[in-house]
Image: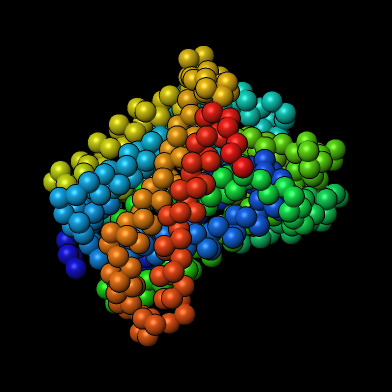
Amino acid sequence: MNQARGEWSSKFGFILAAAGSAIGLGNIWGFPIQTAKNGGAAFVFVYLLLTFIVCFPVVMTEIAIGRRTSKNPVGAFKELVPKTQWSLVGKLGVLCGFMILSFYIVIAGWVFGYFVEVTGGGLQRLATDGEFGIFVGNPYKNLLYTGLFMLATIGIVVGGIKNGIERWARLLMPTLLLMLGALIIYVMTLENAGKGLAFYLIPDFSKITVPVVNSALSQAFFSLSLGMGALITYGSYVSKKDDIISSGFIVTVLDSSIALLAGLLIIPAIFTLAPNTTADTIQAGPGLIFVFLPKVFMNLASDVGYFFASFLAAFFFLLISFAALTSTISLLEVPTSYVVDEKKIVRKRAAILTGGVIFIIAIGSMLANGASDFFTHFITYPSGSDKDFLSFVGDVFFEMCLPLGGFLLSAFAAFRWKTQNLREEIAQGRENYIGSILDKWISFIIYLCPFIIFFIFINTVLAKFFDIVLF
Ligand code: TRP
C-alpha cells in the first residue's frame, strides 16, 4: 500500500466516508421527488429491488478495482488492462464527476442558502408559496451560496483523506439520522399523514412501467455514488486487511435507509400540508423539499413558538448541507485524484484548479431557473421538451452516463477482468469467502448485470430524449 497516497484510519473510517459520499441530496432531495413523480410505493419497491440485486454487485466491483490497484479510476484501468481503451471508462467517470458536481453544488448552495436565511429570521417568508421561485431566480444569491459551498468543498479535499473527509463524516451523519427520525414522528401526528403513508407504502404494481424502472435505476446509481468511479477512488484508500463485502453492504443499507426515511418525512408532509393532494396531483419538482420543509417547521411553530421552530429548521438545513458536503467532497475527489496521480500536480493545486473550473461551468446552472433566459430555455429535445441548463446536465450525466458507466464497469468485471480476479480481491480480508453462497451469488449476478443495465439504459435514452417507449 502506497502510504504517501493516504489510507483510511480504519474500516469504520471507510464506511463512514463512503456512506457520506452516498448519502446526500440524492437521498433527501432526489428520492422524494422521484417517488412522487413515479407513482409512490411501486417506485420504492423497484428501487429497492434494483439497489440490492443490480447495484450492490457493482458497488463491490468498484471497491475491489480500487483496492486492487490503489489508483484513481483512469489509472486503475491502465494498471489492470494496460494499453487498452478501457481507461476511457475511467475518463468518462472523471468527466461525470465534473459535470454532476457542477449542478449538484448549485442545489447544495440552495440548501445552504435556506440555512442562512432561516437563521436570519426568514422562515415565515420561505414557507410562503412562490418564494422558492424567487430565491432560485436570484443570480447573486446563487453565486454567493454556491461559491461558499465550493470553497468549503475545496478546503476539505485539500485537507486530504484522514483529516479532511473522514472527520466530518464521523460527526454529522449520526446527527442527521436522529433529526430525520424526530421529524418523521412529528409529521405522523398530523392530520392526513395516513394518506401519504398509504401512497408511499402500499404498492400498486400496475404502476410499474418502463419509465418507472428507468428512473429507479438512475436514482439508485446516483444515490450510491455509483458508475463513475467514486467508489474506485475511495476503495483505493482501503487497507488490504479489511473485509470489503461487509463494508459495501453496510454502505448500501445505510444509503437506502436514509432515502426511505427522507421519503417517509416528505411524502406524508405533502399530504398533511396540502390536504387536497391525491396520487395524481402530488407535487414533484426540484422545489419539493424547499417548499414543504419550511411549511412543516411553520406548522411546528404553532406548538413550540416561532423562535424555536426557526432554530430547528436552521439546524435541519445545516445538516442537509453537511450531507451534501460529504457528497460534493467525493465528487471533487475523483477528478482531483486523477489530476494528482496522472498529471503529477500537488493535491492542493489540483483541487483548487478542478474546483475552479467546475465553478465556472456551474454558473450555467445557477442562472438556469429564471435569472437568464438563455440558460433557462437552454435546449429543446427531439421529443419536444424544453430544458433548462441544470436539468439538461442532469439528464445527460445523471440519468444517462451513470448507468452507462455501471454497464461498462460490470461488463469489464464479467468479461475482461474476469470474475476470478474479482473474487480473489473480495476474498482478501474475508475468510471463507471463496465458495460461499455470497460468492456464488455475486459471481452469477455480475454476468447478468451488464445485460440488465444495458437494456434499461437504452430505454432511458430513447424515452428521455426522443419520447420513444419501446415496451
Ligand atoms: N450519492 C450522492 C447523493 O446521493 C451524490 C454523489 C456523490 C454522487 N458522489 C457521487 C453521485 C458520485 C454519483 C457519483 O447525493
Q: Position of residue 352 (x, y in %)?
A: 26, 38
Q: Does the rendering let one see residue 444?
A: yes
For the N terminus, the quadrant is: bottom left
Residue at figure coordinates x 33%, y 77% from the top left: 427
Q: Residue furthest bottom?
A: 432
Comparing 174 with 122, the one in front is 174
Q: Is residue 135 above or below residue 172?
A: above
Q: What's the residue at 46%, 72% (across, down)? A: 441
Q: Position of residue 144 (x, y in %)?
A: 44, 29
Pick the residue in front: 157 or 382. Answer: 382
Q: Is residue 221 above or below residue 163?
A: above
Task: Please state, as top left, top right, bottom left or bottom right, where the C terminus lies in the image.
Answer: top right
Q: Position of residue 421 (x, y in %)?
A: 28, 69
Q: Is residue 22 left or right of residue 4?
A: right
Please name the colour scheme applied to the rendered image: rainbow
Residue drawn at 72 percent across, 36 percent down: 283
* Left or right of residue 2: residue 228: right
Asked whether the viewer can see residue 114, the reply is no
Residue at the far top: name it. 373
Residue 156 percent location from the top left of the image: 33, 49
Instruction: Say which residue appears at 60% left-offset and 36% top-offset.
Output: 469
Could you say which is closer to the camera, residue 214 or residue 38? 214
Q: Quadrant of residue 361?
A: top left
